[in-house]
Amino acid sequence: MARVPTSRIDKLLSSMGYGSRKEIARIAKAGGIILDAASLLDVTQRIAVTPDLPTRMTICGEALDPLAHMVILLNKPIGMTCSHKNDGALVYDILPKRWRSRTPAISTVGRLDKQTSGLLLLTDDGDLLHQVISPKRFVKKTYRVNLARPLNGTEGDLFASGGLMLDSETKPLAPAELEVVSTTEALLSITEGRYHQVRRMFAATGNHVVGLHRERLGDLALPDGLAPREWRLLTGEEIALIFNRGD
């Protein structure tokens, strides 16, 4: 039987961004921490950290935030950057403010550039993050691409060849799949994540990307009803879809 982890209340809540241990103690003293309908006044006591804890504990009248190892699906809007440090609008600004103070920190799983929208994952699970971005896992990323000029008809074979070399690089790209939607729109699926890769691939054909939107990771699709700036937590079954290669 797996051992159930335990934690001091003040340490747990501080790691979740609710404040310093002294601040957690003040919240408890004011009756702000409730577990199983009973006030917790001694924040130095240890409790079992079970998956159902967020359904049993409230902080200042609100349900406890998700525990560690959460995965967030965000519909990233254009104009926001995937960084903790850049000036301007950051994707982390969309999440609850206290989540910026969580330990382990929440990070984006890979990045979408400022002018790219769509499916973006964020997590505090370092192992999962590295599994998704590892080139050895061949996680397929599918983008809807809008182009400045019509496709010339050779792009599909070129991208699938595994021989396309981008400027200033010495290793050709892995084969990619192109599905033509219209003369100026296509779906492109890649398994790598090189710097501005999709934009550079079409630039290599003499075209220019004017709109880029990520729709899928593996078999995990961005839900139609999830508007830009909206997010939700993923279930274990949904996370597993990321690694489905459709073989």
Image: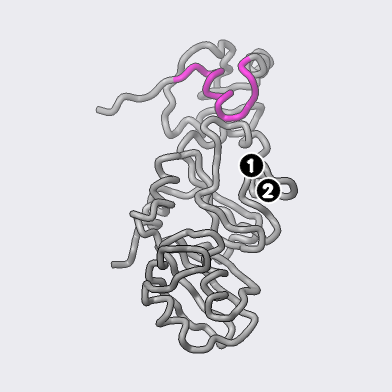
Residue 41 picture location, percent across and down: 59, 12
- Whether 205 is among the magenta residues is no
Q: What's the residue at 36%, 59% (across, down)? A: 138
Residue at the limit of the structure toward the left, as seen here: 1
Q: Quadrant of the C terminus?
A: bottom left
Q: What's the residue at 52%, 83% (across, down)? A: 181
Magenta span covers which residues? Answer: 7-21
Residue under label 1, please give it: 84
192 or 231, which is in the foreground?
192
Provide the secondary structure element on which disc 1 rests.
loop
Q: Quadrant of the N terminus?
A: top left
Question: How did the renderer colour the structure?
Answer: one colour
Residue at the limit of the structure toward the right, as seen here: 88
Question: Neighbour class for label 2 at 10 Å: few (<14), some, many (≥20)?
Answer: some
Say left or right for 74 vs 133: right
Above/below status of 243 relative to 180 = above
Residue under label 2, please give it: 90
Q: How many marks?
A: 2
Above/below status of 227 relative to 58 = below
Say left or right for 191 vs 151: left
* Amino acid type of the residue that numbered disc 2 sits on in the rendered structure: Leu
Would you say the residues marked 1 and 2 are in contact, meaning their CB atoms lie under 8 Å apart? Answer: yes
Residue 88 picture location, percent across and down: 75, 49
Residue 74 picture location, percent across and down: 58, 54
Q: What's the residue at 46%, 19% (across, down)? A: 7
